[in-house]
């Protein structure tokens, strides 16, 4: 199964259903199931911003499963949509008008028992079974 590695707190925000898009500078044509891997790197500024949620942020493990259903070019129209959906979660994309990239739409997000494994760049493969 395909896996994508994210820094914390972003991986947990997806697992908990707060974040419905993952952003990359590259486009993907892949649609289907994907595992969410919480990497060992932490975005300390973002962690501080979301501390009021009182979430746990494990690292170095797969924590969720989702489905990529779309890949959307980030433009002003999409930024407006994100602003209406959740301006706190997506503030980094909304505010940086010079950032060019894509939002991977994630649906059917579900928590999985942690699987401790090192992450990789881009989309990578892992033999997953429930």
Image: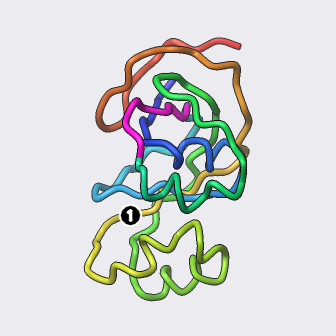
Q: Residue at x 69, y 43 (%)?
A: 55
In the image: residue 112, left or right of residue 3: right
Question: Which element carries disc 1, helix, strand or loop?
Answer: strand
The residue carrying mark 1 is: 102
Answer few, some or many: residues within 10 Å of disc 1's Cα (few below 14, many 20 plus, some between 14 and 19): many
- Residue 40 included in the magenta stretch of the image: yes
Vertical order, 68 against 46 (above or below): above
Residue 34 in the image, given as x and y percentages of width and height: 55, 34
Looking at the image, which is closer to me, 15 or 81? 15
Q: Residue at x 66, y 37 (%)?
A: 56
- Residue 84 included in the magenta stretch of the image: no
Q: Which quarter shows the C terminus?
A: top right
**Magenta-colored span:** 35-42
Looking at the image, which is closer to me, 50 or 80? 50
Classify residue 128 by image quadrant: top right
Q: Residue at x 53, y 47 (%)?
A: 9
Magenta stretch, main secondary structure, is: strand
Looking at the image, which is closer to me, 19 or 54? 54
Q: Residue at x 37, y 37 (%)?
A: 41
Q: Count the marks: how many?
A: 1
Residue 116 in the image, given as x and y percentages of width and height: 51, 14
Vertical order, 60 against 10 (above or below): above
């Amino acid at each position: 199964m395909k896996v994508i590695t994210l820094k914390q707190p972003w991986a947990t925000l997806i697992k908990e259903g707060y974040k419905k898009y993952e952003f990359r500078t590259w486009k993907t044509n892949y649609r289907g199931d994907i595992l969410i891997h919480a990497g060992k790197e932490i975005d300390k500024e973002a962690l501080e911003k979301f501390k009021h949620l009182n979430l746990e942020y494990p690292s170095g493990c797969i924590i969720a499963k989702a489905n990529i259903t779309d890949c959307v070019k980030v433009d002003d129209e999409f930024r407006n949509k994100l602003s209406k959906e959740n301006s706190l979660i997506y503030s980094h994309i909304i505010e940086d008008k010079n950032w060019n990239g894509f939002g991977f739409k994630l649906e059917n997000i579900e928590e999985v028992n942690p699987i401790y494994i090192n992450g990789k760049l881009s989309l990578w493969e892992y033999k997953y079974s429930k």
